[in-house]
Image: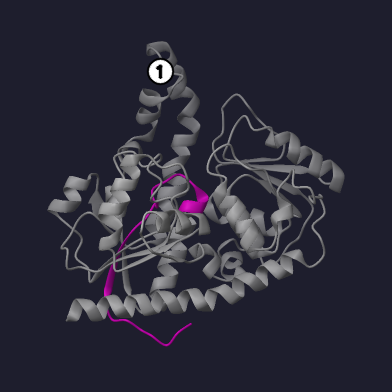
Amino acid sequence: MPDNKFAAKAAVITMHRVGNYGSVLQAVATKELLESLGLDVEFIDYWRPDQIDPAKWASSHSRFVRGPITKRIQSLSSREYFSRFADVFHAFVEENLPLTQRYTSLDQLRKEPPKADMYIVGSDQVWNTDYNIGGTEPYLLQFGSPDTPRLSLSSSIGKQDFSDADVDLFKSTLPKFDWRSVREESAHADLHSMGIESEVIPDPTLLLPAETWRSIGSAKGNSGGFVLLYTLNRGTNIRAKARAVARDLGLPLVTLNPRPLPWVRHRNEYRVPEVPKFLELLSTASHVVTDSFHATAFSLNLGTPVSVSMPPNYAGRLTNILRVAGAESREIGHPEYTTRVPAGMLDAAQRVFVESREAAVAKLAAAINSALGKSET
């Protein structure tokens, strides 16, 4: 880590209220990273409209809901997940992140902006306009004094098909940032094509060593003995792929289910477990089968063999991290894919991450130093 220690307050906005393990853990990683540089960190507790009452939102906006009967079915079918939502994700966030007052709209953020020496956004898919119900403007830091420095830490756009409105939005907001860093090379290239320069900084979860994540998951090393399936996308036939991997390795299949359906039960299944259990399972599995960016990132960081099934949308994030790690052949369907990971591949990936950490943190420290110097002039 660089020697810089900044006596300043940073207000951070990110996807910390999403019911997703990777989202809450990247927020914790961001906190740890910024605090290691001496910043006083506070997370802007922004709730998108779909996060205030997610069960009601889901039943009102599901494409499968067409009347009172289907609304009732939708409500019943999602009850288990949403009843666990607050206990698992919100509780973890409130225990591990320092939070501002609760904000529920851009208008409120503009009327009562968080007091800070700088605003920081990132990481996760904060700039994916397809995802951001209520608008992407809060994640483009469209609030507070224009004199307050604005930085982007490893922000992800996720998609690569941009509407004219997307381009106009990015061109009107991002040049006002003091420093822009993105998570993927593809985002860097896309912004460059719009005349917006940025740097590529790995996801914050990769900027912390495996030992940190094992300590949170209470796992000291890989014990093996099972194949773990973690999927965020239904209808992709990934379970059949996971079964094939488990058969080939002669191991039982364990499912970590983040969005359970009440009428579907799988043998050896964890249904929305606590966040530390997510890390424990990834750390102790003999092999992970996933279509999740963060499950892939954690597996590579932890040194757990992984097979990646590309999701139907926003697969570029996964392609990018496999390429950076030199593990392109871990994509199921790749010409060189095998169930058994080639010798040395995971060790090489971990070396890549170790080497990138020091450079990434040095760039972040320099950006903070420059932003604070500018704000003092």
At 69% from the left and 37% from the top, the residue drawn is 238
The image position of residue 155, as x and y in percent, is 42, 58
Q: How is the image coloured?
A: one colour
Mark 1: amino acid: Lys
Give the structural element (helix, strand or loop) at label 1.
Answer: helix
Quick check: 286 left or right of 7?
right
> Is residue 279 visible to us here?
no
| Magenta portion: prevailing SS class | loop
Does 163 sit left or right of 326 as displayed? left
* Res. 116 image quadrant: bottom left
Question: In the orientation shown, which residue stands out farthest toward the left?
Answer: 111
Q: Position of residue 159 (x, y in %)?
A: 47, 45
Q: Tell which residue pokes out farthest to the bottom in this image.
A: 3
Query: Viewer-proximal residue, 271 or 20?
Result: 20
Residue 287 placement, left or right of 120: right
Say whether residue 236 is left or right of residue 83: right
Label 1: how many Cα within 10 Å (few below 14, some 14–19, many 20+) = some
Residue 13 place in picture, x, y as percent: 33, 57
Residue 7 magenta: yes
Q: Nearer the viewer, residue 221 or 108?
A: 108
Is residue 246 placed above or below 93 in the rendered structure?
above
Instruction: Tell me the quadrant of the picture where the C terminus can be found.
Output: bottom left
From the image, tell me which residue sits under label 1: 71
Q: Residue at x 45, y 79 (%)?
A: 362
Q: Which residues are magenta?
A: 1-23
Query: Eyeballing the image, is 82 above or below 323?
Result: above
Residue 299 part of the magenta-drawn span: no
